[in-house]
Image (tube, rainbow, N blue to C red):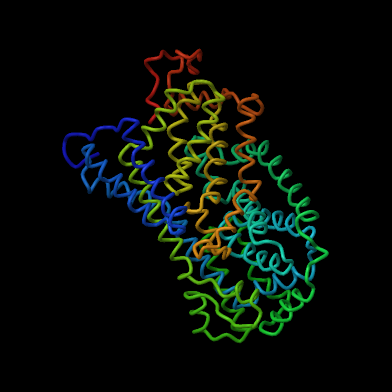
Amino acid sequence: MSDSDTPPRQPGLLLALTPVVLTLMLLGLQLFYFGDFTPHIPLAIGLAITGAIGIYLGHHWPGLERGVFHVINVSLPSVSVLIVVGMIIGVWIASGTVPSLIYYGLTILSPKIFLAAAMIMCAVVSVSLGTSWGTVGTVGLALMGIGAGFDVPAYWTAGAVVSGAFFGDKISPLSDTTNLAPAVTAQNVFDHIRNMMPTTVPAMLIALAIYIWAGFSVVDGSSTSFERIEAITSALETNFMISPLLLIPALLVIVLAVMKKPPIPTLFFGVIVGGLTAVLAQGATLHEVFQYSNSGYSIDTGVSEVDSLLNRGGIQSMMWTISLILIALGFGGALERTGCLQAIISAIIAKVHSFAGIQTAATGTSFATNLVAGDPYLSIALPGRMYAPVYRGMGKSTLNLSRSIEEGGTLMSPMIPWNAGGAFVISALGLGVAQGDLQNLLYIPLSFACWMSPLIGILYAWTGWFQLPASDVERADWIENDRSITDMSDFGYEHPTGESSSAAANPAQ
């Protein structure tokens, strides 16, 4: 709402699409024409364009500002996780936890099974922690080191890490996005997780099969340089105390997560234990631990692979990613505040009337919101609110919707480099995309589990498999809690509660 007594106008479809199209054009110019992977300024200009359109529609700046900061505020817990993960990376390297993981991985794992093992390991840790970002920044970073030792291309390793980490996040009851999707569709989180199994299990099995095939076909284990592995393990032994005991910080964090402790305190406890381990086991001073937490770890071992992996971490290393996330969130908040996103989604709903079409549109809308707004939370919350009344009007369970928006939101987030998820993956795994190493963006198509799940979900929508009708309990809940229901009687659907069409609610509610 504007600050005057006259409510602002709602944008038409063409006007609503204008900031989206212009921003995507600016992103294309920056990324592909200039070859500069810094999406910050195009997104900031997109925010300005959206603000100008909002003022044209009758909004006042204070109201637009509240919309921008509301979305940023909602996602601040994720920014907090980024800060703590930056600290934990620097401290766990200094403590010897990450070097020990790399050392034992190189001595125990085989190049042939490495990619499959990496995906499984990240999935297990992510389910336990409830955070894909925490998994990528810790276990994922160690796996990048192991992959480098096995001469596995970085984009293959990153693809396996992302597949496991984000899929584990998707089905973990401790995950914020896994709780958000059923919350906006008025469902139970465990029913939501159970309903995701028909897409989750096949996608994971297919991805696992591909990674096993890649291990035996793409990764040439016979040419793995044992001299290179020896050089890496020797450098680690020379510069760090290596011991299974140094894995305790990681194990304690996993135990706390399994005990369902909140993620931010759990990860920060990992920072504290890692700092103490760095002092006791590696001889670091308290001041050095502070430096590692803020500015990251720094070492010169004389082995380039080791130096490139271990010279990272700290809060400051996350600032590029955090600044990108804040700008992208502001852009998404402006699009939501001005009604642009709602206008686009309403136009889709007005044109699509079959259940298969709505299910496909819900997944596509979550992905498109991820693409434009750069925020996985908005990509779940906004389509969830907009589409839920339509599902009810069709007499379908909103569990179908919660699965669609989880897959288009959570799983597609790391596939978009300027999205919060993609920016973090690129930064935490040291893929060097911002420095021009664009070939590592191949991790996107190689994150098989992430993009296969939405495709399987869309296939189910058109075949009618695993599509749940609303149960009697759900229908009773709709009446008891006065849930919004869109009148779909003109398209052959009976009103699910038996009310007249005049009782149907606005789909935007």
The residue nearer to you, when weighing 435 against 406, is: 435
Task: Give the vertical position of 234 relative to 477 (above or below).
Answer: below
- Position in image of residue 117 (x %, y %): 74, 57
Q: Residue at x 51, y 68 (%)?
A: 86
271 shown above or below 186? below
Which one is nearer the viewer's eye here, 320 or 276? 320
Residue 131 pos. (x, y %): 57, 55
Q: Is residue 66 left or right of residue 251?
A: left
Q: Quadrant of the C terminus?
A: top left
The residue at the far front in this view is 33
Residue at image position (68%, 61%) is 153
Question: As displayed, is residue 382 above or below residue 258?
Answer: above
Left or right: residue 79 versus residue 466 is left
Camera-side residue of 8 and 88: 8
Residue ID at (64%, 24%)? 464
The spot of residue 23 in percent (x, y) is 38, 46
Indicate the quadrant containing the N terminus: top left, top right, bottom left or bottom right: top left
